[in-house]
């Protein structure tokens, strides 16, 4: 019988193997869900000042999009990978320099060149992890053609080194710098010990995940400083409502999780409802006027098959996405069946959605997976039918799916068999 490694070498091209390994490195580094921070923001300001460019960016790329971890001069927080300059940069060991994108056949027809921000000059360096994988880029851009000297490239490479060292160094951080609660990695580490203890002593244990509704709108409408203040205030309020034995961490940009020992499903749902009401009643005035902020909650509980913190979190996040799909500002408990095939695991895999009698396709990123379903990130869920085929080549999987719940950029699907 072939080993998995041998099978992969025979079944896939070198590019497909490298991409699967790159996504695994991105997942290990927790860079995709890591929130923005002051250090990376400082590096993009340095890029802008040193090279006198209006646009500077530090980003990571998953299977279908480029996510901005720090940016200057760009609108939004992400863009499709297929139109990204940086999708070319991560494929090469050396920096990518484009003196005039309008004259470069790779980019002349790119919408970022033809439309705002009208990019003409681009210089990008891969974010190379210590084990050699390109998870993203550090880049400088301008709306006018220009040259980039060897000295300029050397400086940009040094700034990229600072950025990746910071991202890797954050893995050792116990607390989130903005909110003071546990970092994602520390939450998982302490949560793993709590789950082990709960199983050993046959005690209840529940996880509550919540995500701030409309954080993108707050950031775009009032600035990231206002969004950061909202997150810090919410974290402080929730921390004050928890017991000393509870664990509270920030697991994404606007997403938090609470692990509640000796708490069953009903108790966790009650805690989540209290938190939801508390957040909805908090006074926020990001522009000097009252602004209502809400959050959506998902709850999961340890059972006979959900036996680790990753599965608990994945199930709670699935319930959270359902709460979003049902209108936000509500609490939903995980309703998955307590059999092994329904336990979702956190993953980071490239996928392709086929629909329209397989005539149309869309790249996607698979974030959770079980034998009976998946959680999928997309650039835009609008127009996707309720049933389609999902292909995950790294898993040799091609399954017909039915959408269980959806938001603008996320789908929960169940697999259709037979």
Image (cartoon, rainbow, N blue to C red):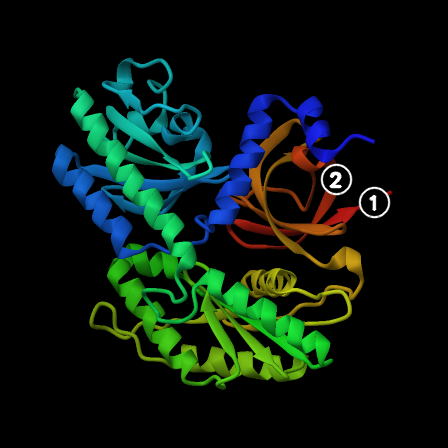
Name the residue tied to disc 2.
399
Percent x, y for residue 97? 28, 22
Examine the rendering and report whether any part of residue 111 can be seen: yes
Q: Determine the residue positioned at 62% across, 29% down.
A: 360
Q: Determine the residue positioned at 40% across, 49% down.
A: 168
Asked whether the residues under the numbered discs 1 and 2 touch, taking CB atoms below 8 Å apart as contact, a structural biologist would say: yes
Q: Determine the residue positioned at 14% across, 33% down.
A: 51
The front one of 247 and 73 is: 247
Name the residue tied to disc 1.
417
What is the distance, in whole Å, between disc 1 and disc 2 at their CAs? Answer: 8 Å
Res. 312 image quadrant = bottom right
The front one of 410 and 130 is: 130
Percent x, y for residue 23? 53, 39
Badge 2 local density, few (<14 within 10 Å), some, or many (20+)?
some
If you read the primary sequence from the N terminus, does the residue marked by circle 1 or circle 2 appear first? Answer: 2
Q: Quadrant of the N terminus?
A: top right
């Amino acid at each position: 019988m072939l080993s998995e490694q041998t099978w992969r070498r025979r079944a896939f091209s070198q590019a497909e193997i490298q991409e699967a390994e790159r996504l695994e490195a991105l997942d290990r580094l927790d860079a995709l869900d890591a929130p923005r921070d002051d250090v990376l923001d400082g590096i993009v300001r340095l890029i802008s000042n040193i090279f006198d460019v209006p646009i500077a960016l530090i980003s990571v790329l998953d299977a279908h999009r480029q996510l901005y971890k720090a940016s200057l001069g760009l609108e939004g927080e992400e863009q499709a990978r297929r139109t990204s300059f940086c999708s070319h940069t991560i494929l090469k060991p050396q920096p990518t320099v484009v003196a005039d994108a309008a004259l470069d056949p790779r980019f002349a027809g790119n919408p970022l060149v033809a439309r705002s921000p009208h990019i003409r000059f681009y210089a990008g360096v891969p974010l190379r992890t210590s084990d050699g994988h390109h998870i993203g880029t550090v880049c400088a851009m301008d709306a006018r053609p220009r040259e980039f000297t060897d000295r300029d490239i050397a400086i940009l490479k040094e700034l990229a080194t600072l950025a990746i060292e910071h991202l890797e160094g954050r893995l050792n951080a116990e607390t989130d710098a903005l909110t003071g609660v546990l970092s994602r990695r520390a939450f998982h580490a302490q949560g793993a010990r709590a789950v082990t203890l709960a199983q050993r002593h046959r005690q209840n244990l529940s996880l509550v995940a919540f995500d701030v509704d409309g954080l993108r709108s707050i950031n775009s409408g009032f600035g990231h400083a206002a969004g950061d203040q909202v997150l810090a205030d919410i974290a402080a309020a929730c921390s004050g409502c928890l017991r000393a034995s509870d664990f509270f961490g920030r697991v994404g940009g606007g997403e938090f999780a609470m692990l509640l020992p000796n708490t069953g499903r009903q108790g966790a749902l009650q805690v989540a409802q209290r938190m939801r009401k508390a957040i909805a009643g908090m006074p926020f005035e990001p522009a000097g006027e009252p602004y209502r902020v809400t959050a959506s909650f998902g709850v999961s509980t340890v059972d006979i098959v959900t036996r680790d913190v990753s599965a608990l979190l994945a199930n709670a996040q699935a319930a959270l996405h359902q709460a979003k799909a049902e209108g936000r500002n509500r609490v939903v408990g995980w309703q998955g069946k307590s059999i092994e095939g329904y336990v979702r695991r956190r993953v980071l895999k490239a996928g392709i959605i086929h629909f329209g009698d397989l005539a149309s396709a869309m790249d996607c990123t698979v974030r959770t997976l079980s034998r009976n379903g998946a959680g999928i990130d997309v650039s835009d869920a609008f127009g996707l039918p309720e049933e389609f085929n999902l292909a995950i080549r790294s898993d040799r999987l091609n399954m017909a799916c039915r959408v269980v719940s959806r938001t603008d950029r996320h789908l929960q699907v169940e697999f259709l068999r037979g």
